[in-house]
Amino acid sequence: MLKLGLCIMIVGHAVVAGIIGKYSGQFDVYTGAGIAGAAFIYIYMIGYGVTSINMNVISSEIFPSQHRSQAMAMIFAVNWMCNWAVAWATPVMLEKIKFGTFLIFACSCIGMLLWTIFVVPETSHKTVEEMDILFKDQLASDQAARMARIFERLGLTRGGHLSTQESKTGASIEHHDVKN
């Protein structure tokens, strides 16, 4: 989805740059070009929506569990600062470099797409445990191993059923203090 969103954003920026480059100052004559430009801004926004949501998911997966909340706070802070910088700079850029503004944005998206293709690992259809291994986070697998040891000490299987020996004897477990 990240790659798809980036491709949509690249197309949106490139088309808007082309429309502004060709029809700038003539939108009263070429109203269709203005409408197409506005449509491609909305198409870009769809790509941004798909991409920004996926970036938050990936960001939350790459940090170890014990540091995830702090890292996500920093990521969101940087994201907001970058959004502010783009919102502040875009009108100035449009005034000074006209359609080049959208070419710069398209090139930024191309850079992000290349980074995604060559650096970001594929995470679709992976379990949480596989994600932990992929990003070298051992906390979840350590917790799973600890739970397995606890179930083993209690004589329970992973599903919470009584072990074969307890089934034969009719013993049940009501309360145990378990220390790791």
Image: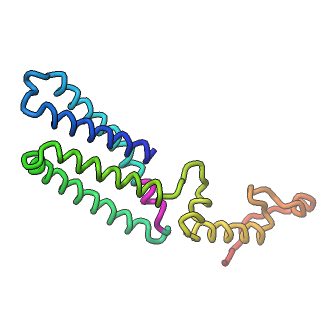
Q: Position of residue 20 (x, y in %)?
A: 16, 36
| Relative to 138, 60 lies left or right | left
Q: Residue at x 18, y 47 (%)?
A: 101
Q: Which residues are magenta?
A: 56-63
Nearer to the camera, 74 or 4: 4
Quadrant of the snapshot with the C terminus: bottom right
Q: Is residue 10 part of the magenta span, yes or no?
A: no
Quarter of the image for residue 29 reads top left
Nearer to the camera, 9 or 163: 9
Q: Position of residue 83 (x, y in %)?
A: 23, 54
Q: Residue at x 8, y 28 (%)?
A: 26
Quarter of the image for residue 140 reads bottom right
Q: Position of residue 129 (x, y in %)?
A: 61, 60
Q: Residue at x 90, y 63 (%)?
A: 165
Q: Residue at x 74, y 59 (%)?
A: 158
Quarter of the image for residue 151 reads bottom right
| Relative to 70, 94 lies left or right | left
Q: Position of residue 163 (x, y in %)?
A: 84, 61
Q: Mostly what secondary structure, the magenta segment?
A: helix
